[in-house]
Amino acid sequence: MPLFGSFENLLRALKRNFYLHSADLDDVVKPNVAYLRECGLGACDIAKLCSRQPWLLTANLGRVQAMVECAENIGVPRASGMFRHALHAVAFLSEDKIAARVNYLKNTFRWTDAEVGMAVSKAPSVLARSKESLQRRSEFLISEVGLEPLYIAQRLEGRLRPRYYAVKFLKENGLLKRDPSYSTVFKISEKAFRKKFIFPHKEAALHLAEDYDAACKGDVPTNFRFT
């Protein structure tokens, strides 16, 4: 249980991988965990990774090593803070599927190999997204916002789209003294964004905070309410 951090996480892992019940602790589980540590993953990273991919604990060590090699091959080194996410992204992707996803990114966003590599290294999960999900991000980021497509790697519903609508609302209602770039708007932390763009306008735009919170939950209005 210490590996998973809590009894609930352990139960979740057991439900996802029935073989954990009978796995050989000394010959299989411990060597796999030790190898992941050799790859630079800390206890917290391993716990999070194995909670989502519990098969890593019972798989042949060679398979785990192959997955690590695959993560490195997509441009995410072991020392990177994104390495755990890269392992999760490639867990069930063959080399052929990864190549197909890379080609799709290049064709959809007109990226070069270098641009694809940059996006994947910063957000490996882009490889695991469906074509429909990628297309939605393409239409929003390129057509509506006019950003460089590198921002495809970030979550629309969780950060980009709500922030876009909030800042667009502030601009249209003359509440911003300066016109911020969307690249800056999307990069800052959630705390910094609220401090700069939400809290100062509570009196002028009574429903801004409420509408922004709703947008962050996936209910994005066409127009934020001014009164």
Image (cartoon, grey):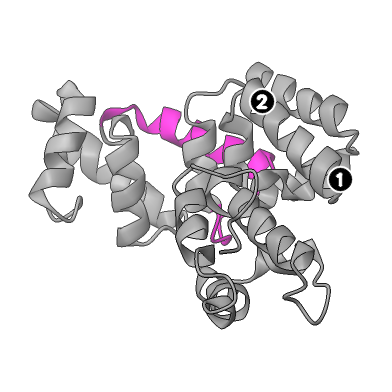
Indicate the amino acid at tag 1: Ala
Looking at the rendered structure, the secondary structure element under dot 2 is helix
Residue pictured at 64% horizontal, 60% vertical: 166
Is residue 43 on the magenta stretch? no
Indicate the amino acid at tag 2: Ile
User: What is the magenta range?
Assistant: 58-82
Residue pictured at 78% horizontal, 62% vertical: 172
Determine which residue is flagged by label 2.
Answer: 98
Determine which residue is flagged by label 1.
Answer: 114
Within 10 Å of disc 1 (Cα), the crowding (few <14, some 14-19, many 20+) is few
* Residue 34 percent across, percent down from the top left: 32, 51
Q: Which one is in front, 30 or 166?
A: 166
Residue 75 in sight in this render: no
Residue pictured at 30% horizontal, 47% vertical: 33
Residue pictured at 58% horizontal, 57% vertical: 225
Looking at the rendered structure, the secondary structure element under dot 1 is helix
Within 10 Å of disc 2 (Cα), the crowding (few <14, some 14-19, many 20+) is some
Is residue 77 on the magenta stretch? yes
Q: In this view, does 36 lie to the left or right of 116?
A: left
- Vertical side of 123 occupied by 21: above or below: above
